[in-house]
Amino acid sequence: MNLRTSLVIATLLLLAPFAHAGEWYRFRNEQGVMVLANSIPPSLVENGYSVVGDDGRVLRVVPSRQEAMRQRAEDEARRAREEVSASRQREDDELLKLYASPADVEAAMQRKLNSIESDIARIRADLESLHGKKSDLESRGAERERAGQPPSPEVYGNLQIVSDQIGDRERSIAARRLEQQQVRESFDRDLQRVRLLLGVPEPVDQPTGVPVSEAKTAAATNGH
């Protein structure tokens, strides 16, 4: 027997298993009729079958290819849900390690916002100084023009440098403002989650009588 013949026989044995003593295969044949036999045609293996004993007890069930795929998809979806749930639990545990109460979250947020505001104030002070330098350079250039003198390369070069620095500071301020908004949104999510985990109700906005977070959302939507 050559190697190719051996492989063919092994494949057929795998695709069309034979029952052991005292076992039978129960499956539907090509006509859809349920039958018992000691082997399964290879073409019907993927349709699924059961192995039963002489006493009729089901010893094991081999699902169809479609059922196996569906079960695999369900298992993967269940594992994904479990992973999300476990990740959420880890995040909640870390959150409660950081904050013992909603007030702790609000205090941490305010510290972060104040730090960013201090950076913005420093950048603004630098920006005002740069605007002063720019005005001085522009005045010097205007004086030369009124005196009929040619533009000064030094004044022009310094003016360009200062203008670039002003643009850089303005972009820095805009970035820090955006960071402030992101910090508020991040801490607001943490705040809502801590309240939920600790069972602390959200305070109500007195004028509207709705939760504070909803009042803020409504104000933002209306452009207030």
Image (cartoon, helix red, strand yellow):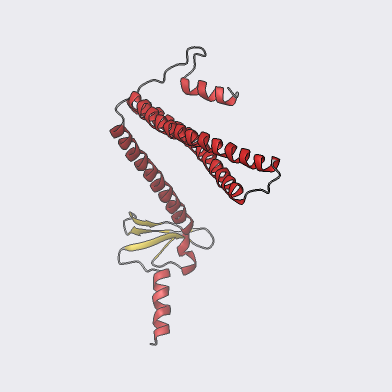
Which residue is at a point 35% across and 58% down the rendered structure image?
Answer: 52
Residue furthest bottom as drawn: 1
Left-right relation of 143 to 94:
right
Query: From what the image shows, is residue 76 above or below residue 131?
Result: below
Which residue is at a point 58% across and 38% down the rendered structure image?
Answer: 136
Q: Quadrant of residue 195?
A: top left
Query: From what the image shows, is residue 155 above or below residue 50?
Result: above
Q: Quadrant of residue 7?
A: bottom left
Residue 41: x and y in percent read 46, 68
Count of numbered badges drawn on the protein: 0
Q: Quadrant of the N terminus?
A: bottom left
Left-right relation of 11 to 59:
right
Q: Quadrant of residue 25?
A: bottom left
Residue 203: x and y in percent read 42, 18
Q: Nearer the viewer, residue 217 or 126?
A: 126
Query: From what the image shows, is residue 135 above or below residue 20?
Result: above
Residue 123: x and y in percent read 47, 36
Q: Nearer the viewer, residue 189 or 120?
A: 120
Q: Quadrant of the C terminus?
A: top right
Residue 83 appears in view: yes
Which residue is at a point 39% across and 43% down the rendered structure image?
Answer: 84
Q: Nearer the viewer, residue 88 or 21?
A: 88
Residue 196 appears in view: no
Q: Nearer the viewer, residue 113 or 124?
A: 124
Residue 171: x and y in percent read 54, 41
Residue furthest top as drawn: 207
Which residue is at a point 41% across and 20% down the rendered structure image?
Answer: 202
Query: From what the image shows, is residue 215 above or below residue 146?
Result: above
